[in-house]
Amino acid sequence: MFLVKNGMVVDPEKLDMQPFDVVLDGGRIAGIGFYEDNGSYETVVDATGCVVAPGLVDVHVHFRDPGLTYKEDIRTGAAAAAAGGYTTVVCMANTKPPVDNAETLRYVLEEGKKTGIHVLSAATVSVGMKGQELTDMRALAAAGAAGFTDDGVPLMNEALVREAMELAAELDVPLSFHEEDPAFIKNNGINHGAVSEKLGICGSPAVAEDSLAARDCMIALDVSRRAQTRGNAGGSAGCPLPADCVPAPGGAIANIQHISSRAAVEQVRLAKRLGARVCAEVTPHHFTLTEEAVLKYKAMAKMNPPLRTEEDRQALIAGLRDGTIDIIATDHAPHSAEEKARALTEAPSGIIGLETALALGITELVRPGYLTLPELIAKMSLNPARLYRLDCGRMQTGAAADLVVFQPDETWTVEKFRSRSANSPFTGRELCGKVKYTICGGRIVYRDRGGREERL
């Protein structure tokens, strides 16, 4: 038996926060209420002054394993996740070799079992991530694929996208889409605009994202309507059509990844209103930074899709507030210091994010009043769990004993990382919100002791 005492407990389903104790037993929450520390508990965590919430769920991480483990591997990635309050992560499939077969998928899942958290993996939509032929999605789903994505490479074959969505609806699994049409991009990772003009490069215009997001939202709408007509909405989805409803993440077959532009947010908003089984995720760096960061941080602020304008950033925040954007996901993308030190147009895109995501959400969204703390937690635990049909992200008796305990008012300076890589523009920045304990399966997998972190 395990007691977490004196905390403010967040229920992301009720969007509520109350002072309670939490009892864990056998990998499950055994009770939420008020309990005496009578000496019968094997472990007691004093959460005075802290928030107790469901363990965070990140549906978009790159652990670079197999093939690129000099950047990150499953063990170091899981350690970074635990330090950030994450108890479940979904690895992207663009490894070397890619996760387009059961053997590679089994490797990732087996290595994940050796860590202290739940490491899941998506498989690719297309064979070899070439966008020409579907993988055996049925066999991969049966082998444990959490969902499907060619993240890192946009799918340009509309017929293949439609076929994949129809099969995803049948299997009741999500597809996640990287929306950047290469036909519009001359220099990836930097927004086409005022900053790219200062740098003398063309960059990546928002239309590259907007055009594919619109396409996939409309394909998802048509597939949703046809599935509804057949009486096969799949799983928890299925609002009657035509409808004035907003499908929940748990019914989504299409997830628009790392959304970054104002127009793309509008595309998702419209598609939801029309009844499409679609949802969207946003990264902390996209709701925090703008294209101006490239001038200061150089390649540390280079990512796909790029940081865009302040108008786009405000549209992302508005989308989080009104529910258009369901999920906050990190797109944790480790690279070596040598790679990021290259010239801006040659350096790889992406930054790490697992260890700063919660604090950025508190600092940039909760403290300014854009979201309440329960709303933030819903977008970082409950909604991503629902997207991937996972048994986590909830705070109620019988739910998984996966928790994060954090001090929402504690300030700290980003200085060092558990990740193998350190490619972050937030190094040296003071943030608010410090993870104190991460508990997975009823076991402490990370704790902070007065600034001296201990990994377990």
Image (spheres, rainbow, N blue to C red):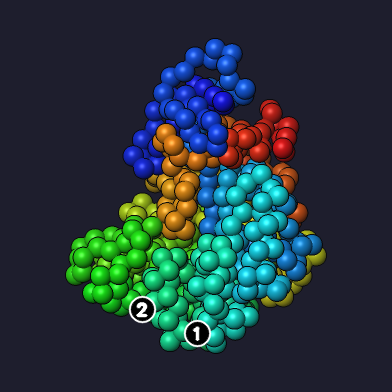
Camera sees residue 317: no
Q: Secondary structure at mark 1?
A: loop
Residue behind mark 1? 156
Residue at the extreme top? 38
Residue behind mark 2? 219
Is 393 displayed left or right of 354 in the figure? left
User: Of the residues shown, which amino acid type is indicated by label 1?
Assistant: Met
Q: Alpha-carbon distance for marks 2 and 1?
A: 13 Å
Task: Give above or below for 269 relative to 439.
Answer: below
Q: Quadrant of residue 344?
A: bottom right
Percent x, y of residue 290: 53, 61
Residue located at (35% from left, 40% from top): 15
Depth check, front residue: 272 or 359: 272
Percent x, y of residue 13: 36, 43
Depth check, front residue: 252 or 285: 252
Residue located at (45% from left, 39% from top): 399
